[in-house]
Image (spheres, helix red, strand yellow):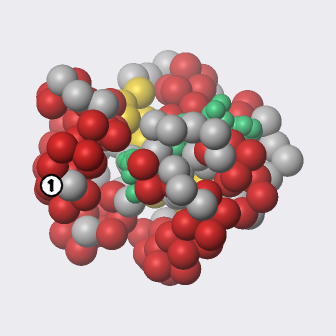
Amino acid sequence: MTGPQIVLVGPMGVGKSTVGALLAERLGTAFRDTDADIVAAQGREIAEIFVDEGEPRFRELEREAVRTALAEHAGILALGGGAILDDSSRALLAPHPVVYLSMDVEEAVKRTGLNQARPLLSVNPRKQWRELMNARRHLYAEVARAVVATDDRTPEEVAQAVLDALELKEA
Ligand SMILES: Nc1ncnc2c1ncn2[C@@H]1O[C@H](COP(=O)(O)OP(=O)(O)O)[C@@H](O)[C@H]1O
Ligand SMILES: O=C(O)C1=C[C@@H](OP(=O)(O)O)[C@@H](O)[C@H](O)C1
Ligand SMILES: [Mg+2]
């Protein structure tokens, strides 16, 4: 199977982008992030796309970004937290080594609470995060080959746990 060596999924702020970049460095490969692809293609920040055109339009752009990245990218791929909401994206993920990075709600608030770049958590982060996870937890679990808890772990420790979970060795 060609495609990414590792795909990271999980909720906003869990560390997909941070850990993905570290994994790419450790494995000597390239890192790609579908949020960054969307921002580059649109010339606008994610929050601006939500405000200007709404979440459904963002999800369309995201579906296309996921499809393209899975087809083109051979390194480490981080998805946006809501990418797994789309049925066709979940189906495309099935053959790939997907790792679900998890955390509890308090950790989530610490990592994202004051960050206005994530429009879905901007009003009442603790309540919104719980609701998001109730809707999504089973979808992350459905696409993942392994789950790695990130609470009380540094990004370096999370990266190591991902390599261990997939039984991958460094370059
Ligand atoms: N293991 C970790 N421990 C503490 N903070 C972390 C950890 N991983 C990421 N962070 C911090 O949490 C925030 C969100 O990380 P990010 O990689 O953007 O998450 P995601 O891409 O999953 O939304 C950043 O400020 C990052 O530095
Ligand atoms: O969970 C979500 O619905 C979202 C997660 C964000 O990505 P991160 O998970 O990288 O923060 C970004 O795609 C957008 O704000 C929506
Ligand atoms: Mg990210």
Q: Which residue is mark 1?
A: 57
Asked whether, in this view, residue 69 is left or right of residue 166, the answer is: left
Q: Residue at x 36, y 65 (%)?
A: 84
Q: Position of residue 136 (x, y in %)?
A: 47, 74
Q: Position of residue 161 (x, y in %)?
A: 72, 47
Task: Name the element at disc 1.
Answer: helix
As drawn, 104 above or below 13: below
Asked whether, in this view, residue 5 is left or right of residue 100, the answer is: left
Q: Position of residue 6 (x, y in %)?
A: 45, 45
Q: Quadrant of residue 156?
A: top right
Q: Residue at x 27, y 37 (%)?
A: 48
Which of 51/90 is in front? 51
- Whether residue 8 appears in this view of the structure is no
Residue furthest front in the image: 123
Quadrant where the C terminus lies? top right
Asked whether, in this view, residue 40 is left or right of residue 131, the answer is: left
